[in-house]
Image (cartoon, rainbow, N blue to C red):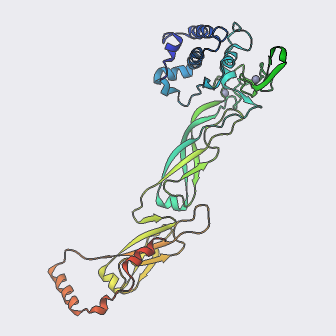
Amino acid sequence: MKRDYYDVLGVGRDADQGAIKKAFRRVARECHPDVNPGDPDCEAQFKEAAEAYEVLRSPETRSAYDHYGFDGLRGQQVPDFGQFGFNDLFNVFFGNGTFDSVLRDAGGGMWGASGGGAPAPRGEDIDVPVTLTLSEAVFGAKKSIEVTSDVTCATCSGSGARPGTGRDTCPQCHGSGRMREVSSLGGFGQFIRTSTCNLCRGQGTIVNDPCETCRGTGRVRETRTVDVELLAGIAHGQTQIVRGAGGAAAQGGRPGDLRVAVAVEPDEHFVRDGDDLIYRLDVTMVEAALGTTAYVPALDGDIEVTLKPGTQPGEVKVHRNRGVPVLQGYGRGDLKVVVNVQVPRHLSSEQREVLEQFAALTSETNYEPDQSFLDKVRAVFRQ
Ligand SMILES: [Zn+2]
Ligand SMILES: [Zn+2]
């Protein structure tokens, strides 16, 4: 459970920037590694205070936190200090010198790093749902989808620096993005360790004069419309990925992906079975017995279906290549028309009489089976 940021710093909700800065310095002083070497509680306390300070020092994140609590910070760039070592963190906030050195404005340095050096993290992947009709799923569809994500800040073109200013060479690593740490091993020589510069996060440059629009991050939150061409043949439950259409990354990083989750509305005429479409053709008992011509409203134009006299229930008429296009492949599945024979209900006495006369005139030969019913059903679904 995270503690309230104001409690962490021990300030009131109406504390001004000066009071917040002072409170953070006080916690930092109490937790300084030189004062408390290797005290894990102190380290956790400092990281907690650093996070609280980072959120409350920015009017935008502070306002989001004031109104919505921790939920308000989702999607905002709240730094995760867990990954930093204690000493590294102090260096980030208080510079590489002594603790009493001037508290530097960590804004651009912490968050807006970009440039050369270590690879910047990818932008966020965005999931969006889209609902298609069967026809749209079969033939493909162009959809305009609203997406809210980070985009490159237009004011500074993503550099994070105030227009007219640039990014400055990182004073800690002098632009290399790497730190070289030399430890003396007493009389046994030296131990040299190199690591990613924690001030510029390996980018080699920092922003000293942050862009006001994006506060040095190079990105702003925006709702935009993305036109997506959904592929012909896409099915319910599939996800189409649009590479690079997700959230913008920090400068130098690749944007995230847009992941479009497809739902297909049930169709009143057709059932989809893989790449095949199944259509139920209703004919009357008399039509089935006498034969008839019917029309199937296929998705790409009517199909004429001729039923011979003596057509049986469950008979299947297969129309090759009139089904669903193979997703990112060649050809199409089949359209299978299944005959459903309707038997009349609510007969009048006159109708009943005629049917009884008809029954008296029929013999076994009228009802000889041809194909078994199960075979017909099997023919509908691919083995
Ligand atoms: Zn900007
Ligand atoms: Zn650096």
Say left or right for 206 vs 26: right
Up the image or down, 258 lies above or below 69; here it is below
Up the image or down, 261 lies above or below 280; here it is above
Say left or right for 344 vs 148: left
Examine the image and state in which quarter residue 199 appears: top right
Residue 165 visible to the viewer? no
For the residue pair 196 and 220, the one nearer the viewer reads as 196
Q: Residue 347 at x, y = what percent?
A: 19, 77
Q: Residue 324 at x, y = what percent?
A: 53, 66
User: Which residue sits furthest front?
Assistant: 187
Up the image or down, 239 lies above or below 153; here it is below
- At 56% from the left and 20% from the top, the residue drawn is 55
Q: Residue 5 at x, y = what percent?
A: 51, 17
Residue 155 visible to the viewer? yes
For the residue pair 268 and 316, the one nearer the viewer reads as 316
Examine the image and state in which quarter residue 247 appears: top right
Examine the image and state in which quarter residue 311 appears: bottom left
Q: Quadrant of ligand 2?
A: top right
- At 63% from the left and 41% from the top, the residue drawn is 256
- At 64% from the left and 10% from the top, the residue drawn is 32
Q: Residue 223 at x, y = what percent?
A: 55, 37
Q: How many marks?
A: 0
Up the image or down, 354 lies above or below 65; here it is below
User: Which residue sits furthest left?
Assistant: 349
- At 47% from the left and 60% from the top, the residue drawn is 134
